[in-house]
Image: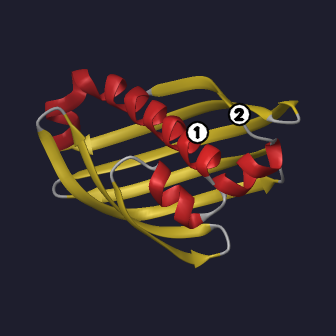
Amino acid sequence: MKVEGSYEINAGINKVWDALNDPKILAKMIPGATALERVSENSYKATMNVGVGMIKGKFEGTIDLIDPIEPESYTLKVTGKGPGAFVNGTSDFKLTALSENKTRIDVVGEAQIGGMLARVGQRLSGNAARSMMNQFFDNLKKNVASG
């Protein structure tokens, strides 16, 4: 499934870039994240509670920031496995400075879910992916504004 969107953040491009690369802030932004531990410069081990509809579970996996071009773009890759299911996804982030204190982020993402999560939640998965992406950026707005 493919998801995309544009989000305006009331902060300068460097502040937004820093937030998108800070594991403490990332942990607050990723819906369902319960732990995020840096394992290398651009790679994290993650624990998340993920659910689609009535199917929920604890997933463990990795989050990788691929091909970062500061402060303009990177690809966020997420892989995770949980009880009888998996989630894989990539999202391309492109940051554009609209003004000194406003940044637009354009995102194009692709996600795959499998196992029980896909069988039971197939009809709901597109809405769930869009909802998680919107939550991610709402959390970014809150954390950048307060940080």
Q: Residue, x 13% and y 32% (percent of image)?
A: 120
Label 2 sits on a secondary structure element that is loop
Kind of element beneath mark 1: helix
Identify the residue shown where x is 18% and y is 53%: 57
Colour convention of the picture: secondary structure
Query: What residue is disc 2 on?
Result: 10
Residue 5 at x, y percent in the picture: 59, 23
Q: Which of disc 2 and disc 1 is earlier in sequence?
A: 2
Residue 64 vs 86, above or below: the answer is: below
Residue 18 lies in quadrant: bottom right
Quadrant assignment, res 65: bottom right
- Mark 1 vs 2: CB contact within 8 A: yes
Would residue 72 be seen by someone viewing this image from the given angle? no
Tell me the residue that label 1 is attached to.
141
Residue sitting at the far front: 146
Residue at left offset 32%, top offset 41%:
113
Residue type of the residue flagged with mark 2: Asn
In this picture, residue 80 sits left or right of residue 82:
right
